[in-house]
Image (cartoon, rainbow, N blue to C red):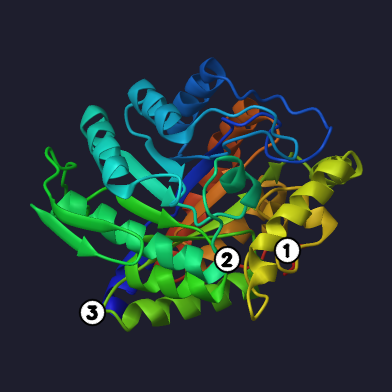
Amino acid sequence: MSADNDENIAAEPLKFAYWVPNVSGGLVVSNIEQRTDWGYEYNKKLAVLAENNGFEYALTQVRYMASYGAAYQHESTSFSLALLLATERLKVIAAVHPGLWQPGVLAKLIATADHLSGGRAAVNVVSGWFKGEFTALGEPWLEHDERYRRSEEFIEVLRRSWTEDAAQFAGDFYRLRGYDLKPKPLVSDGRPHPEIFQGGNSTAARAMAGRVSDWYFSNGKDFDGITEQITEVRAAAAEHGRTVRFGLNGFLIARDTEAEARDTLREIIAKADPEAVAGFRGAVQQAGSSTGDKRGMWADSSFEDLVQYNDGFRSKLIGTPEQIAHRIVEYKKRGVNLLLLGFLHYHEEVEYFGSRVLPLVRELEADLASGAGAPEPVGATR
């Protein structure tokens, strides 16, 4: 059944999400000009622009205190609700940290947001890489794989709270003893509860996604990198009779010429903030590099990769609209269902994406569905 579901999902049109810039400093650790803003009025306008330019999802990021070029930040769940109420179709994913949230309480909050938005609330469960936030709040910092064990229980509590009456759960981190959440979130075809997204590239993260998550988010990857992850997570999901969808992070620089796009990338890296990048590198050593097999998030990231927080340059969505559209569809052919995008100048570039890139993607998808296939884009390397 899982293989049939995978094929049905693969036939669906690609979905697009954007990183909500609710944290100051933009999406790159660089002193380059970024015509973006972390405030609500800017983000409210951006959310409307996005849903009118082909974006189905938005991911509200979370930082709890100043760090690595992000001096200020709005809390993710409250900001997500504000964006939901400002839009009509956009689904907003709030990033949340187990260990800093009680999952039953979060389940109640998201259920309310779901009713207020007509069924458009979702969560991204972040197991955590920033030790300083936990210690500053007086919370214990768990070893890497233990953080994922806690996240798995966290998701189980969310799901049971949303779908069961008098829910029961007994784990190592969380308990439910007849928890009766009402009203429960809205139910629609193919959506029994708010969608549960999960990040993390490690072995523990992949296995967890196969067991419990609806969506698996990957950091930026080339074709081989994302294919390896999708293959492994699908195998883990199949063992449990489940299907998982896949999202890929990418920082998109679309310009009228490839030279303009490449020049923009070079300027971002040339104006990178070395101190902030070094601080970020030190903090994320608590992630992939702390695992036994060293293949988690940021485990092999270079200085240039870390200028974009989630390795977004690695996906190589940089060039003309035609080059980027071809590369996006090549990712679809490898099993990607959603592209999570960041931009330098959000308002202008979201509109440019909607008018110049997305129509080409849809044309290539139609060719793919008809059997014509999508040729490899010129200059698009792994």
Contact (Cβ within 8 Å) of mark 3 with mark 1 = no
User: What is the x, y in percent for residue 379?
Assistant: 77, 62
Image label count: 3
The residue at 56%/30% (across/down) is 22
Say which element carries label 3: loop
Say which element carries label 1: loop
Which residue is disc 1 drawn over? 380
Q: Which corner quadrant of the image does residue 164 belong to?
A: bottom left
Say which element carries label 2: helix
Which residue is disc 3 drawn over? 1
Contact (Cβ within 8 Å) of mark 2 with mark 3 = no
User: In this image, 36 relative to 15: left or right?
Assistant: right
Which residue is disc 2 drawn over? 330
Regarding residue 18, the answer to whether it shows in the image is yes
The residue at 82%/40% (across/down) is 264
CA gap, disc 2 to disc 3? 25 Å
Q: Amino acid at mark 1?
A: Ala
Q: Residue furthest top?
A: 41
Q: Amino acid at mark 3?
A: Met
Frontmost of labels 2 and 3 is 3
Residue 370 versus residue 222: which sits nearer the camera? Answer: 222
Contact (Cβ within 8 Å) of mark 1 with mark 2 = yes
Q: Amino acid at mark 2?
A: Glu
Image height of 374 relative to 268, above or below: below
CA gap, disc 3 to disc 1? 35 Å
Frontmost of labels 3 and 1 is 3
